[in-house]
Amino acid sequence: MSSKLKELSGAEFDAAVAQGVTLVDFWAPWCGPCKMQTPILEKVAEAVGDKAVIAKVNVDDERDLAVKFNVRSIPTLIIFKDGQIVETLTGLQQATTLIPALEGAAD
């Protein structure tokens, strides 16, 4: 995984999304669309720079987080601002959707 993308565990999740804008990708290694989402997220991370953090949560390892955020299919991407959910997107998302959503949340 790229150094631009941060892997989150349950222990650090709340602190990681508490301040600023964070996009969290709920994914699994066996999920085809999830594998296609990662390079898109790397491009998004480059495009938004310091405006947002891009993070990933492996639902196989972090089932409690998946349940907490009602993740029923993957990939599910949730945008947080200062710890609050701003937007939830399900399925493979393109950079043309994600970048404006993150920039809007950062304003």
Image (cartoon, rainbow, N blue to C red):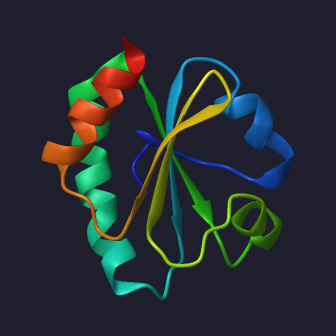
Farthest residue in the left direction?
Answer: 96
Find residue 71 and report its horizontal and vertical position in percent: 61, 69
Using residue 71 as the reference point, say whether residue 96 is left or right of it: left
- Return the x and y of residue 79 as percentages of the image width and height: 48, 40
Query: Which residue, as the protein is rendered here, is positioned at the far top?
Result: 107
Q: Is residue 57 above or below residue 104?
A: below
x, y percent for residue 48 = 28, 25
Residue 59: quarter of image: bottom right
**In the image, what residue occupies the spot 51% across and 78% down?**
73
Write the residue at 52% across / 33% down. 22
Left or right of 103 in this view: 74:
right
Point out the image quarter for the C terminus. top left
Image position of 61 with respect to 31: above or below:
above
Residue at image position (29%, 47%) is: 42
Labels in figure, total: 0
Looking at the picture, does residue 2 appear above or below residue 66?
above
Q: Which quadrant is the N terminus positioned in?
A: bottom left
